[in-house]
């Protein structure tokens, strides 16, 4: 009897020994299950001791594997804590002395309304929050059926655990240097869609992945394992895009994060995602777009004629017009379109909490006017003029340029960490905005090397009003911190500065052009003005000349006396493809400076 009792254990030992010799603990899937960085430096990204069974498991995949197998042989309930490990080890031919058990909580979460597919979700950038400048990435577990709305799907979020009302600069500083804990959390998808699409007014793209049902089961089992595990959050690299991509790579291998630069943003992952292959097919099966509440309203507004839009705006100011001949004599189709547009605008104003009392009265009047019309919706939109994030301009930049200063020429080399400037493509980003981090340029001039520019952070948001309706648009603002050489003022002029500006902008030419005015404040070593503090007035113009050809011009007048009264800047961008563009630049203050630049964009 004693011999029979130990036969399963002996068989398991023989099985595991054969797998040990083939380095099962170094298998890429095992390393991904433990979130180890790589086989040569097997330290896990997960900080929680409770995630590991072995006391050395955080830094020793082999020790963790042995402890896992031992745990499955001694305690059947460990299958419920580590279902993905259990599923994978069984697939590798291992057997365990403890029988398979039913995991009630896991089954309730995973199978009560079965998860049938997986998607990755991109929410566009949100310039009002430094945590969301680059957009955001979610993992979505699809449970929807014809009877169950997709808003009840699970969505998995990875994010930093940030205190409420954390200062933006504190967030960026601590986020860059790992000052926050982070982790995965699950919520019903409608919460994220409501927050991003309805509150923050961000467009959403969903990429459905071509996974088998077995892949879906394995992935969801692993998500169950890591829920609640703690990581260190790093804004530039170990962020939502990186860790969610690593989870997907449990199925597809390292197609998304292999040979990444030392920084990771969602747009990079989606660019790679669209070209990824799995089982000799495209990984992405389908892409769906969900417009923000703001995008929906503008689509309705654009569907009105100029005359009807003017009437709708008049009704907003005086709802009694709904019951006067000006409106009641219109045909049913026109009345429905106007009311539907006003309903969309009412919802937008409620989100922004503008004119609360007025909006409530208007809403009641709209309901009353709509009830006398025949049932049925007049307007329905399927196609929006929006491009998916994988087709956006790539975020990092290397440039080579020729610069002419006072008839002498220099060769300039540049590097930008991320992400876009005001002349870049508008795809999957906030139009008329600028978000550049670590923008560096050096010049070889007269056999000497000069630092021309070092911008640590350059943010700009013009916040234009896309319609003439009330409460549209906001304050334009900009922030810039860094160093630059001002050759257009004098050869030796340079500034180390921090700058902030505020103003307003206005759209022209069917939203293809923008004019703006800013009042800027400067602090730092401002050699061109020989002051530590200065202020300026800036006027500028941006326009799309033809197709994607973009032009920006500006003039700036400083308060303190300079070598020149007004600084002029002109730049023209000519796109070649997603990876290249050519820039023509001109600056003038006391001297002129010309530049011809070739930009290469990469991820």
Image: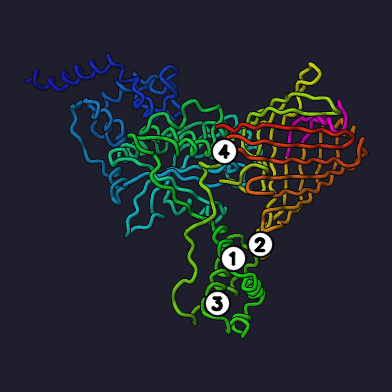
Question: To which residue does mark 2 refer?
Answer: 467
> What crowding class fits label 3: few (fewer than 14 Cα within 10 Å), some (14-19), or many (20 or more)?
many
Q: Is residue 358 visible?
A: no
Among the two numbered marks 2 and 1 on one chain, the one whose residue lies closer to the N terminus: 1
Q: Quadrant of residue 8?
A: top left
Which mark is nearer the camera, 3 or 4?
A: 4
Residue 292 image point, x, y percent = 53, 56
Q: CA distance from mark 3 to mark 2?
A: 20 Å
Say whether residue 533 is left or right of residue 168: right
Q: Is residue 214 visible?
A: yes
- Marks 1 and 3, the one that precedes in the sequence: 1
Counting residues from the start of the chain, the first of labels 4 and 2 encountered is: 2
Closer to the chain start, of discs 1 and 4, is: 1
Give how far apart the Cα atoms at labels 3 and 4 are: 44 Å
Residue at 34% x, 22% y: name it: 27
Q: Is residue 359 above or below residue 278?
A: below
> Which element is circle 2 on?
loop
The magenta-colored residue range is 480-498
Q: Is residue 493 magenta?
A: yes
- Return the mark for residue 301: 1
- Residue 539 rendering spot, x and y as whole percentages: 80, 48
* Residue nearest the observer in this picture, 66 or 453: 453
Q: Contact (CB < 8 A) between labels 1 and 3?
A: no
In the rendered image, which residue does mark 3 sit on? 335
State which mark lies toward you, 1 or 4.
Answer: 4
Nearer to me, 99 or 34: 34
Q: Residues within 10 Å of mark 2 (few under 14, many from 20)?
A: some
**Vertical order, 475 against 39 (above or below):** below
- Residue 90 location, quadrant: top left
Q: Are marks 3 and 4 in contact (CB under 8 Å)?
A: no
Helix, strand or loop for disc 4? loop
Tell me, yes or no, whether the two marked residues, 2 and 1, touch with CB atoms within 8 Å: yes
């Amino acid at each position: 009897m004693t011999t029979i009792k130990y036969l399963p254990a002996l068989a398991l030992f023989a099985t595991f020994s054969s797998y040990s010799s083939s380095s099962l603990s170094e298998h890429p899937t095992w390393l991904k299950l433990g979130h180890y960085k790589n086989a040569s430096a097997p330290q896990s990204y997960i900080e929680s001791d409770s995630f590991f069974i072995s006391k050395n498991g955080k830094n020793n995949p082999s020790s963790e594997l042995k402890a896992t197998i031992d745990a499955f042989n001694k305690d059947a309930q460990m299958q419920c804590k580590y279902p993905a490990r259990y599923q994978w080890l069984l697939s590798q031919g291992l057997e365990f002395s403890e029988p398979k058990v039913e995991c009630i909580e896991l089954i309730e979460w995973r199978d009560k309304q079965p998860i049938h597919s997986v998607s990755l979700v991109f929410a566009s950038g949100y310039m009002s929050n430094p945590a969301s400048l680059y957009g955001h990435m979610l993992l979505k577990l699809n449970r929807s059926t014809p009877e169950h709305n997709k808003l009840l799907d699970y969505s998995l979020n990875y994010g930093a655990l940030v205190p409420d009302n954390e200062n933006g600069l504190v967030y960026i500083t601590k986020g860059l240097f790992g000052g926050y804990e982070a982790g995965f959390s699950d919520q019903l998808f409608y919460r994220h869609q409501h927050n991003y699409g309805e509150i923050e007014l961000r467009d959403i793209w969903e990429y459905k992945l071509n996974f088998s049902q077995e892949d879906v089961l394995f992935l969801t089992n692993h998500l169950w394992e890591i829920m609640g595990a703690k990581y260190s959050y790093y804004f530039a690299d170990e962020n939502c895009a990186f860790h969610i991509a690593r989870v997907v790579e449990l199925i597809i291998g390292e197609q998304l994060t292999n040979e990444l630069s030392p920084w990771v943003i969602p747009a990079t992952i989606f660019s790679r995602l669209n070209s990824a292959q799995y089982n000799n097919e495209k990984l992405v099966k389908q892409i769906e777009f969900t417009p923000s509440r703001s995008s929906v309203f503008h689509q309705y507004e654009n569907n009105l004629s100029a005359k009807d839009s003017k009437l709708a705006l008049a009704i907003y100011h005086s709802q009694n017009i709904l019951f006067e001949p000006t409106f009641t004599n219109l045909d049913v189709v026109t009345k429905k379109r106007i009311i539907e547009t006003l309903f969309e605008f009412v919802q937008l104003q409620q989100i922004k909490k503008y004119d609360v009392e007025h909006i409530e009265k208007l809403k009641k009047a709209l309901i009353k006017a709509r009830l006398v019309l025949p049932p049925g919706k007049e307007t329905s939109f399927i196609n929006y003029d929006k491009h998916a994030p994988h087709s956006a301009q790539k975020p990092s930049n290397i440039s080579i340029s020729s610069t002419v200063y006072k008839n002498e020429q220099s060769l300039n080399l540049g590097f930008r960490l991320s992400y876009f400037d005001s002349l870049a493509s508008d795809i999957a980003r906030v139009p008329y905005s600028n978000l550049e981090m670590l923008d560096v340029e050096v010049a070889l001039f007269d056999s000497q090397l000069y630092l021309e520019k070092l911008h640590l952070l350059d943010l700009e948001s013009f916040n234009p009003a896309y319609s003439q309706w009330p409460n549209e648009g906001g304050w334009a603002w900009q922030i810039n911190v860094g160093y630059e050489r001002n050759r257009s003022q004098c050869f030796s002029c340079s500034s180390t500065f921090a700058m902030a500006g505020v103003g307003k902008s206005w759209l022209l030419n069917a939203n293809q052009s923008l004019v703006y005015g800013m009042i800027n404040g400067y602090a730092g070593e401002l050699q061109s003005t020989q002051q530590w503090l200065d202020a300026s007035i800036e006027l500028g113009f941006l326009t799309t000349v033809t197709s994607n050809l973009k032009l920006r011009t500006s003039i700036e007048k400083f308060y303190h006396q300079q070598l020149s009264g007004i600084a002029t800047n002109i730049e023209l961008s000519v796109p070649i493809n997603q990876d290249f563009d050519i820039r023509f630049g001109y600056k003038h203050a006391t001297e002129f400076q010309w530049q011809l630049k070739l930009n290469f964009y990469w991820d």
